[in-house]
Image: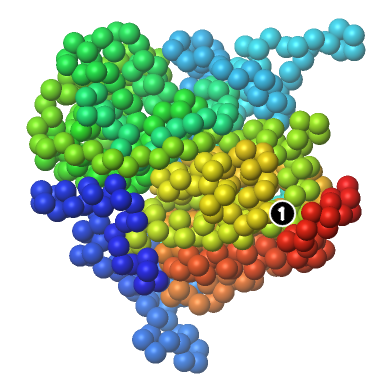
């Protein structure tokens, strides 16, 4: 662990205030437990095999390292490479399943809405629906020639919903959105036979292949991991993003506020935490109804303050400008303020300990999804059902309002909150950076070619209690900006950036190198573009494809001066995301550590050899400065391969020279 990232628990002042309060009040948080409990050395290396009952077989690296031949094997003979590859593959399977099951829920609600069965939902973005329908092979017109006219929107919606949902159970052929990839990438996948046939099928097959005694070739295991990961990025997650945009409205740049300081002393504070925006969208609607507002006032509160946490927060921020209370490591801390009247959760990234922390305060924890219940007696379950969505949401809001009077312990809301601009999408980046004339990514490419923008980074992913909260995120992103690398962000990285003021146009002046600063100031955008939640990493894939298609920067995503990172990752979803980025041609760096170090041959495959196949590869460092340097080196290498490295050196020339560059590329 890099020393500077270990020193403090968090670099976020609001979080540290809450950690002090927790200590004073004797509350245990994940920050304390991370100090007390060391990670298992063998699991950390990826070489603990527990897929059958003859083990767990433990194959740690010998203290002295491997001398001569590596003779370590489990009872069945499985080598460290097979074991680490299987463990890695199972993380991909779980991650892909999680995003995709989220996507399935969205597709089901979308279809129910299209059929008029979910009366509280309404399709918001029909323009996008028509565009997406085409990608799914849904006819958007009827008649031919002069008689051709637009097809009925309800018909389009129903067929789109059916086709989208069919991807999960599909057994053969291809998932439709794989075709969105650049042609060279699609052809490569086709040649390698890794295009997902159907979403569930690839996850099931990966679980089968990693059962005891099945696939024993780590490269072959990674091929199927790739197919399952692509079923996430280019199918399950991408479908989530698209249908959520259609159903709830495509985000446009919007102002918002972030950090625990968004909680209000004199209002009913409801935190919605988790991932699927189905529930949170309805909570937004319910909390704004006069009925609920009046009820809150009748109970002595000035109003209702709905704030998000984790990726659900990104969803309601992007579409409604709702405030964000914090990222993953702040969920216990929010309750410790004593001001949260209800924490409403659905699926993913919900720490079991919030129920324990809630016992020490008045906070009501409300589970809402049959797939994610909590056993603790102080947790209430209100099942959310799309057919009665608004009623369910009102019931939840009422629970929170009724709980307002029960605030007991000392309430301490930290002052910290930052403003930010979020809500960027493939479409809105095109609008801001593409130029209204061409309406493509041409201007962005132009500025990459002329060197004002050195390259593109996707920095995403979780917080991890084994590192200093938010520290690696911020060190990495700031270093990239200083070097004129524009950053696309999602998930908990986006929130770390938001809290630190990086998601404002003004940040360009303070943090960017001269080229990127000039672009951001001219266009009026932040240097870090917030694209949404984890499923919205699919927006990074489609944006990268749009950059390829705009021309001048190669034929494939792997040709771009671009790289990806998840410096504080922790969830299995992150591994699925990492693998689909690698398989899409992206150099992808993770912080914290990857559980592959105990299998040096397999590790070398992921970190080096896999690049020959996919043009992308994995890498790891627990030092964000090292990650930044490696990303920049990679970007420079790609610039050189594209023959645009010279332009980069000219960027600091005077105006005359700059004009010359413009003329050169025009
Ligand atoms: Ni889906 S997956 S901790 S909330 S980004 Fe945040 Fe984002 Fe990781 Fe979870």
Element type at mark 1: loop
With 553 as the anchor, is 473 left or right in this view? left
Spot occupied by residue 51 in the image (x, y as percentages of width and height): 38, 61
Spot occupied by residue 71 in the image (x, y as percentages of width and height): 45, 85
Residue sitting at 64 percent across and 33 percent down?
428
Residue sitting at 52 percent across and 56 percent down?
477
Q: Residue furthest bottom?
A: 68
Report crowding for label 1: few under 14, some 14 to 19, many 20 or more residues within 10 A (C-alpha).
many
Residue 134 position (above or below residue 607):
above
Quadrant of the image occupied by residue 546: top right
Residue 264 position (above or below residue 491):
above
Residue sitting at 50 percent across and 92 percent down?
68
Residue picked out by circle 1: 452
Q: Is residue 455 visible?
A: no
Q: Is residue 113 visible?
A: yes
Q: Nearer the viewer, residue 409 or 201?
A: 409
Residue sitting at 67 percent across and 39 percent down?
523
- Total marks in image: 1
With 634 as the anchor, is 415 left or right in this view? left
Spot occupied by residue 413 in the image (x, y as percentages of width and height): 23, 38
Residue 578 position (above or below residue 311):
below
Q: Look at the image and name its color scheme.
A: rainbow
Q: Nearer the viewer, residue 497 or 402?
A: 497
Q: On the rendered image, what quadrant is the N terminus found in?
A: bottom left
Q: Nearer the viewer, residue 96 or 8?
A: 8
Quadrant of the image occupied by residue 338: top left
Q: Is mark 1 within 8 Å of ligand 1?
A: no
Spot occupied by residue 502 in the image (x, y as percentages of width and height): 49, 47
């Amino acid at each position: 662990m890099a020393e500077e990232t270990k020193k403090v628990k968090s670099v976020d002042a609001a979080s540290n205030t809450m950690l002090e309060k927790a200590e004073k009040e004797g509350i245990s948080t994940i920050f304390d437990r991370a100090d007390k409990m060391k990670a298992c050395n063998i699991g950390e290396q990826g070489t603990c095999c527990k897929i059958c009952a003859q083990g767990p077989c433990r194959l740690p690296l010998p203290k002295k390292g491997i001398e001569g031949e590596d003779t370590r094997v489990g009872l069945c003979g499985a080598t460290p490479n097979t074991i680490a590859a299987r463990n890695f593959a199972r993380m991909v399977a779980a991650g892909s399943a999680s995003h995709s099951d989220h996507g399935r829920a969205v597709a089901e609600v979308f279809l129910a809405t299209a059929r008029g069965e979910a009366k509280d939902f309404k399709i918001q973005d029909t323009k996008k629906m028509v565009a997406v329908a085409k990608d799914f092979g849904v006819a958007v017109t009827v008649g031919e020639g002069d008689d051709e006219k637009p097809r009925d929107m309800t018909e389009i919606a129903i067929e789109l919903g059916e086709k989208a949902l069919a991807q999960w159970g599909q057994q053969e052929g291809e998932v439709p959105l794989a075709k969105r990839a650049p042609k060279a990438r699609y052809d490569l996948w086709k040649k390698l036979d890794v295009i997902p046939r159907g979403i569930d099928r690839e996850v099931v097959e990966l679980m089968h292949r990693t059962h005891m005694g099945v696939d024993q070739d780590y490269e072959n295991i990674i091929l199927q991991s790739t197919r399952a990961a692509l079923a996430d990025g280019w199918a399950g997650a991408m479908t989530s993003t698209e249908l959520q945009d259609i159903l709830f409205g495509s985000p446009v740049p919007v102002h918002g506020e972030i950090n625990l300081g968004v909680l209000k002393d004199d209002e009913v504070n409801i935190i919605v935490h988790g991932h699927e925006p189905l529930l949170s969208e309805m909570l937004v609607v319910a909390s704004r109804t006069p009925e609920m507002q009046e009820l809150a006032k009748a109970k002595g509160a000035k109003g209702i303050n709905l704030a998000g946490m984790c990726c659900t927060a990104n969803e309601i921020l992007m579409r409604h400008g709702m405030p964000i209370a914090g990222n993953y490591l702040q969920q216990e801390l929010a309750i410790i303020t004593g001001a949260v009247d209800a924490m409403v959760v659905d699926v993913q990234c919900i720490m079991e300990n919030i129920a324990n922390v809630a016992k020490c305060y008045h906070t009501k924890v409300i589970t809402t999804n049959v797939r994610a219940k909590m056993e603790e007696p102080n947790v209430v379950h209100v099942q959310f059902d799309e057919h009665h969505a608004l009623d369910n949401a009102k019931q939840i809001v009422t629970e929170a309002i009724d709980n307002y009077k029960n605030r007991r312990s000392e309430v301490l809301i930290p002052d910290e909150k930052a403003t930010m601009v979020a809500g960027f999408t493939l479409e809105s980046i095109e609008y801001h950076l593409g130029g209204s004339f061409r309406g493509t990514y041409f201007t962005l490419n132009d500025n990459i070619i002329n060197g004002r923008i050195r390259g593109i980074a996707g920095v995403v992913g979780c917080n991890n209690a084994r590192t200093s909260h938010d520290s690696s995120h911020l060190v990495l992103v700031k270093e990239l900006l200083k070097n004129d690398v524009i950053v696309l962000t999602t998930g908990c990285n986006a929130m770390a950036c938001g809290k630190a003021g990086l998601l404002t146009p003004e940040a360009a002046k303070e943090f960017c190198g001269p080229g990127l600063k000039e672009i951001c100031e001219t266009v009026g955008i932040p240097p870090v573009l917030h694209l949404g939640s984890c499923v919205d990493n699919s927006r990074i894939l489609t944006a990268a494809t749009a950059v390829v298609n705009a021309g001048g920067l190669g034929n494939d995503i792997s040709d771009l001066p671009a790289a990806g990172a998840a410096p504080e990752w922790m969830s299995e979803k992150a591994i699925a995301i990492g693998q689909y980025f690698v398989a899409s041609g992206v150099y992808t760096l993770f912080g914290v550590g990857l559980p592959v170090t105990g299998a040096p041959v397999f590790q070398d495959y992921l970190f080096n050899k896999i690049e020959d196949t996919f043009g992308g590869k994995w890498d790891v460092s627990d030092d964000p400065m090292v990650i930044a340097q490696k990303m920049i080196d990679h970007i420079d290498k790609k610039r050189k391969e594209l023959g645009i490295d010279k332009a980069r050196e000219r960027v600091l020339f005077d105006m005359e020279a700059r004009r010359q560059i413009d003329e050169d590329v025009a």
